[in-house]
Image (spheres, grey):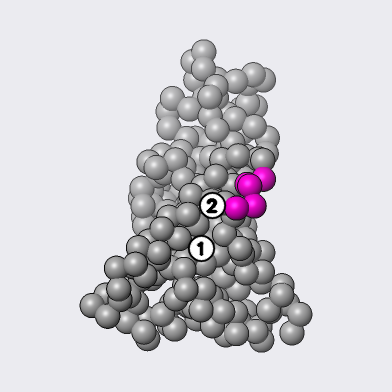
Amino acid sequence: MSVAGRCLLLVVGDSSRTHLAPQAPGEGPARAALGPEGLVGPAAVAPAPTPRFRAELSARRWAPRTLCGRPWHEMAAGESGPLYDGQPVHLAPECASCLRVLDAWLGTPPAPPGVELLAALVVERIVEAGAARVRDVPAEHAEALRTAVRARLRARGWRVRTHFGGGILLVTAAPGDRSGVDAATAERWERRARQVLDDVAASILSPDPLPPGHRHPDLAWGTWVAAW
């Protein structure tokens, strides 16, 4: 793929997450897209790749580390399917650090009006329940919302954890100093945070909708931002 005039390779790291590897600099170390075992032996899929494609995969043109600085295992299989038996197919990078590098290349779009209001509502939900979830967040504005939420919570002295994926921003937080928080409130925060995490995991693993009583009410990006 090509982004901002740079050629990148979608690759899989040791954790099976997808990353982006840049082309190697002219005089730096370089490696091939696949290891020597990638397209040989009975595990290779049919039809066999053309000599030209095989030569491209064997060319030592890629940096040995990803945009986020991690070593990688091999090129990911894309829309054309696996290159050998059992290779999983990936269509996009999953590493947030690699994506942040891309964002820096492309430039950060200005945060639209309403982000600060939505961040304030997220903080209200956090203070009440210990966790909050915002759905339908555009990828290009996820960092702006995440930054606004973190700033508001850290100004209160709270510890914050965020996760973004599939258009959903999940935020969990708790006061750094709980000396002024009664045990019942602290337990309610912990219980609600666990429920939100469980609901997110269940929604990813199961195509069936969650029972209404088990789904944490979401905040919708479009209600507070896109309508402005």
Which of the pair 195/226 is nearer the observer? 195
Residue at (48% x, 27% y) in the render: 38
Q: Are marks 1 and 2 in contact (CB under 8 Å)?
A: yes
* Residue under label 2: 200
Residue at (60% x, 20% y) in the render: 45
**Callout 2 secondary element:** helix
Mark 2 is on which residue type?
A: Val
11, above or below 156, in the image: above
171, above or below 31, in the image: below
Disc 1 versus disc 2: distance between alpha carbons?
9 Å
* Residue under label 1: 170
| Residues rendered magenta in the picture | 209-213
**Callout 1 secondary element:** strand
Would you call the spot at circle 2 few (<14 residues within 10 Å), some (14-19), or many (20 or more)? some
Asked if the magenta segment contains residue 143, the reply would be no
Residue at (63% x, 26% y) in the render: 49
